[in-house]
Image: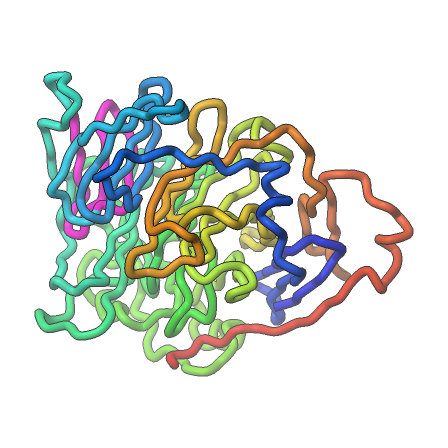
Amino acid sequence: MITLLLMTHMMTLSGPLATVEGAVDSTIPKAAREADYYQAVNIPVPSGIVLEVGGLAVGPGPGEVYASTRRGDIWKIEDAYGQSPRFTLFSDGLQEPLGLLWKDDWLHCVQRGELSRLRDEDGDGRADVLETLCDDWTISGNYHEYAFGPRIDKDGNFWLTLNRPFGDEPFGKMDWRGWAMRIGDDGKMVPMAGGLRSPAGLEIAPWGDVFYTDNQGEWCGTNKLCHIEEGDYFGHTWGVESAKLPGSRMEYPGKTPDGLTYVEAKKKIPDLKLPAIWFPYNKMGKSAAGMLWDTTGGDFGPFQDQLFVADQHHASVMRVDLEQVDGVWQGAAMRFREGLSCGALRLAWGDENVMLVGQTSRGWGSVGKKSEGLEYLRWTGEMPCEVLTCRSTRDGYKITFTLPMDRSTLEDVSSYRIENYTYKLHSP
């Protein structure tokens, strides 16, 4: 990693083909100062509702938001941006739905053991139809067998990611844990890529590519953002034996080397996919989660076409500037908004292009003061002074800013502090 302190800006420079990945360090921005540009507004939740947000989707009506909870509920929220939002229980009894998506008048969710869709057909405000679209993967009952998604690619296929289990496995080891799955209209599951650890974020880019975020731990040196293509192996060894099963699009990688840098490991495993972005551990969060591309056309500030990434532990949102070089994705990451009320897990664009942030903390830990909740970020119209882009060149980096900068300051080498470090592919 390369850490660079430049005035008051924090960024992370990262490249999968480089022998040294990149990062930039600075003092943590104060939430009060960030609030001058991006206000955090709490959506009040009625007493008795535990809104531990696992999934978030904007409904078809104005001011309408749907939030699924880790306890198995889906809440319909009307007048979500008003003083007194109205909450209606749309569905309950689901198994920890950690993602929501609207498609063709159906609300889709991924539960631990299936991809489902729901609809209110009689107009009473509650779902009265629930259909299973796919349940081709199995669960053992392990507490950490989360499933994330769904998202829809440019061809209309659903995507989801399956978490690896932790701790004891009293009911045996299940196949396909730590995999990314594609599900077609026929409901059949296609295992597209393996070696994932705790892939809490999944998103389809506006141009159609698939990306996911993973959480730090064994075989994953720090949180990362990865581009998924058919056959990719991301380095975690837990579910690689499933590559030997029928249907796998990933070849069995063989023995994964322990203790090498990722660049060295890739020389031994050609199909090992290196991240597009490393998020320096603790400097930029501890639990990378949901993502959101800026498609607001400037209504949310100067970051059009860039990617926002939630961090559950740090109760924050980060920003990513991606670039593609010779077909490979790399980029820079910057802090964006800290000081939220709770762990940020899900992001969505709301009415008037505010950023909805679904939050939860129970059991996972967060620096936020609350245990769960729902907020939105609104741009005040004031232009923040930030690093806008950072792109690699043959002899360094080209940095642009959101505002004009003092030339003499930028040319003064004392304005910069740089350090470098890296992460290893290792099982602690």
Q: Is residue 84 above or below residue 132?
A: above
- In magenta, the rendered stretch is 97-119
Residue beneath the point at 40% across and 44% down: 203
Give the residue at the far front of this rendering: 47
206 vs 129, nearest the viewer: 129
Residue 133: where, in percent of width, then height? 15, 39
Magenta span includes 102? yes
**Which of the 4 quarters of the picture holds residue 97?**
top left
Q: Is residue 159 visible?
A: no
User: Which quadrant holds the N terminus?
Assistant: bottom right
Magenta residue check for 398: no
Residue at 82%, 60% in the rendered image: 415
Q: Measuring from the top left, give residue 198's x and y in whole percent.
A: 33, 61
- Quadrant of the rendered structure where residue 173 is? bottom left
Q: Is residue 219 above or below residue 84?
A: below
Decide if residue 358 is on the left or right side of residue 386. left
Instruction: Spot the residue most to the right.
Output: 408
* 347 lies above or below 175: above
Q: Is residue 238 left or right of residue 174?
A: right
Residue 91, position as x, y percentages in the image: 15, 34
Mark yes or no: residue 198 visible: yes
Q: Is residue 43 left or right of residue 246?
A: right
Quadrant for the C terminus, please: bottom left
Q: Is residue 417 above or below residue 425?
A: above
